[in-house]
């Protein structure tokens, strides 16, 4: 089969690999019909995630057709069209039993702090991902769901990560009716977070980025007020002015480890890997909210320490909540929202790259060229 | 200043729009207003259905004996990834990083990052030996700079990342250039001593 493989920082190519085998009785092998590149993949692509091995196939957002099932699989059959949450999870450990699917303890031997994610380095379990023609899907009875007839493929693939994660970001903000909400980052995750904040009754939604084309999308798709942080000498001061010097009730960090806006922070983390992530947006979030506020963090950070302004968080009495999104727990509600038209996830898809051209897809998404918001990946056989 | 900002008084900041106005303007506004009825609440809720799992502890996938694991785990998890097993020098560094240091230790992660660089360098050299050399043009997707409006996407647009994007080609090409320089020097030295 053809599969994207990592060749070192900033380099990927497509190679022939063996079709994955059933390795556990509850495995399935899925033939991928559509995949996507996530902002998280860029952290791997830039070499920021420890234990990202040469030859690793990335990709944790994909849908496909069941190609083979293990002997104990009961909920899926060969030929079923399935969407697969980006988390790999067992369904029965202490965490899964409590709905914390992204924190499953039975699937990632390499680390306890993070669960397992398809195609997301050995630190996240060492599973090859879905930017390929076939992928091994562990716990086939637990994770995947048959795509409802009424749902489009592009909506389904957006529901495997970006849309639920944005919605989850808004939920972690514990938004109450009338709250003011500031979202850092106008990528797919931030745009969905901004849109979801309204569903939860926000009174005001502000989105911050430095890419004008994405801020335009935030105004149009997410009905948000927008600020380009390069227009202000200090975006935190502007956020104070915007809220009568109180600060926002809720902030959502949808930027993560490679935040821009402070060259030193960016270079020490994204280029030199001396920090687990450049916490510029997170620090802005901490400083832009009022005392006693909630900061929701869905932007991803690596396992190495980062220079977070913890003193400000403490002194302001903030509640900081973050996690990888437990995608399947969000689905029933999100399916309703998609069905009744409150959310149209595929509206953020701007690019569709054939798997064979994936190197171009990574470069365009990483360098933010050509008005890109969300790139999909289409395997040749699909 | 004609008015004392609200932060310095007991009063709440006045809302710009009422809930009725927002409901009229924004599709779906307030659909999930009830904080007790959002999919994440209550955060720790014992799930009756166990989401399709028919086991208390999953059957063990074979082959875990030789696999690396975090020493914070009691054992290799019952299910694990089998992509790219450890090999060679980078594999030895990784094995040590896992066997000796917990996730709490910076040494664990810094050794893993070092192993990544060692492996990448080795892979570039091997790719030449194996006659499937890494191609810095196709593998970086750099030609999309021409086909996907590289210049107009970047300049005159207030972007703040243009101040470091120039470093990327240096990071990518650096090792190739360094290897060429070292190679040329070695060759020159070999010639002189002939
Ligand atoms: N927690 C989860 O489950 C989960 C899931 C998916 C993605 N993520 C993470 O969410 C983040 C965003 O993902 P995405 O797909 O939207 O990525 P993306 O790269 O498309 O978007 C990131 C955006 O942040 C902007 N940005 C950079 N610095 C900023 C700053 N200082 N302030 C405001 N904006 C800034 C960028 O210009 C870009 O538009 C990533 O870190 C990703 O790893 C987390
Ligand atoms: Zn993702
Ligand atoms: Zn579990």
Image: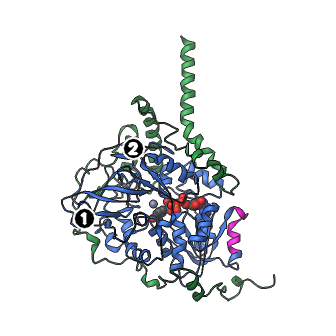
Chain colours: A blue, B green
Same subunit: marks 2 and 1: yes
Q: Which mark is residue A358?
A: none
Q: x, y percentage for residue B189?
A: 56, 18
Quarter of the image where one finds residue B159: bottom right
Residue that sits furthest to the right in the current view: B1
Q: Secondary structure at mark 2?
A: loop
Residue B129 appears left or right of A80:
right
Give the x, y percent position of residue B89.
Answer: 39, 37
**Image location (x, y in percent) of residue A33:** 36, 56
| Residue in the picture at 24% in, 50% down | B63
Above or below, A64 against A75 in this view is above
**Ligand 3 in which quarter:** bottom left
Please state which of residues B164 and B134 is positioned toward the viewer in this rendering. Answer: B134
- Magenta includes A31? no
Q: Residue A195's spot in the image, x, y percent? A: 53, 73
Q: Provide the residue span drawn in magenta.
A: A230-240
The residue shown at (54%, 19%) is B187
Q: Residue at x 49, y 69 (%)?
A: A166
Q: Chain of mark 1?
A: A
Look at the image and tell me whether residue A280 can be seen: no
- Tell me: A46 left or right of B85: right
Q: Secondary structure at mark 1?
A: loop
Q: Is mark 2 within 8 Å of ligand 2?
A: no
Residue A24 visible, this angle: yes
Identify the subunit bearing mark 2: A
Residue A76 is marked as 1
Find disc 2 in the rendering and name its residue.
Answer: A55
């Amino acid at each position: 089969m053809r599969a994207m493989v990592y060749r070192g920082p900033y380099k990927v190519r497509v190679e022939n690999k063996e079709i994955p085998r059933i390795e556990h009785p509850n495995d399935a092998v899925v033939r991928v019909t559509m995949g996507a590149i996530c902002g998280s993949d860029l952290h791997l692509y830039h070499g920021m995630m420890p234990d990202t091995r040469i030859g690793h196939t990335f990709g944790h957002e994909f849908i496909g057709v069941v190609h083979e099932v293990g002997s104990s699989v009961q909920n899926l059959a060969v030929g079923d069209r399935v969407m697969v949450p980006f988390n790999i999870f067992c369904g029965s450990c202490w965490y899964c039993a409590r709905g914390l699917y992204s924190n499953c303890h039975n699937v990632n031997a390499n680390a306890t702090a993070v669960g397992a994610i398809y195609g997301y380095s050995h630190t996240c379990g060492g599973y090859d991902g879905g930017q390929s023609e076939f992928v091994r899907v562990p716990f086939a009875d637990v994770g995947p769901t048959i795509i409802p007839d009424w749902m489009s493929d592009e909506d389904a693939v957006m529901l495997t990560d970006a849309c639920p994660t944005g919605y989850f970001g808004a939920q972690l903000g514990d938004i109450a009716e009338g709250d003011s909400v500031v979202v850092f980052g106008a990528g797919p995750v931030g745009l969905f977070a901004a849109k979801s904040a309204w569903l939860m009754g926000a009174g005001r939604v502000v989105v911050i980025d430095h890419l004008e084309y994405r801020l335009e999308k935030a105004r149009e798709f997410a009905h948000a007020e927008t600020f380009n942080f390069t227009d202000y000498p200090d975006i935190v001061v502007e956020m104070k002015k915007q809220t009568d010097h109180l600060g926002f009730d809720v902030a959502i960090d949808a930027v993560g480890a490679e935040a821009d806006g402070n060259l030193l922070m960016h270079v020490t983390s994204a280029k030199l890997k001396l920090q687990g992530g450049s916490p510029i947006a997170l620090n802005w979030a901490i400083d832009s909210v009022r005392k006693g506020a909630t900061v929701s963090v869905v932007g991803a950070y690596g396992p190495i320490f980062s220079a977070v302004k913890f003193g400000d968080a403490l002194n302001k009495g903030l509640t900081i909540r973050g996690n990888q999104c437990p995608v399947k727990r969000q689905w029933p509600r999100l399916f309703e929202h998609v069905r009744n038209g409150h959310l149209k996830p595929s509206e953020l898809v701007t690019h569709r790259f054939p798997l064979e051209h994936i190197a171009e897809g990574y470069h365009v998404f990483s360098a933010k060229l050509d008005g890109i918001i969300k790139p999909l990946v289409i395997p040749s056989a699909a | 200043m004609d008015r004392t900002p609200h932060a310095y008084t007991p009063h709440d900041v006045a809302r710009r729009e009422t809930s009725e106005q927002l409901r009229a303007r924004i599709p779906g506004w307030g659909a999930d207003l009830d904080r007790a009825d959002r999919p994440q609440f209550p955060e720790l809720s014992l799930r009756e259905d166990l989401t399709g799992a028919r086991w208390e502890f999953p059957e063990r996938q074979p082959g875990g004996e030789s696999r690396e694991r975090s020493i914070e785990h009691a054992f290799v998890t019952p299910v694990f990834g089998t992509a790219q097993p450890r090999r060679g020098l980078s594999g030895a560094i990784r094995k040590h990083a896992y066997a000796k240091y917990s996730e709490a230790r910076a040494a664990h992660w810094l050794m893993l990052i070092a192993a990544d660089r060692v492996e990448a360098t080795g892979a570039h050299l091997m790719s030449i030996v194996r006659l499937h050399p890494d191609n810095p043009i196709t593998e970086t997707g750099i030609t999309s700079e021409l086909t996907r409006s590289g210049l107009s996407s970047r300049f005159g647009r207030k972007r703040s990342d243009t101040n470091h994007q120039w470093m990327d080609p240096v990071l990518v090409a650096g090792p190739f250039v360094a290897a060429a320089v070292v190679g040329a020097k070695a060759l020159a030295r070999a010639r002189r001593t002939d």
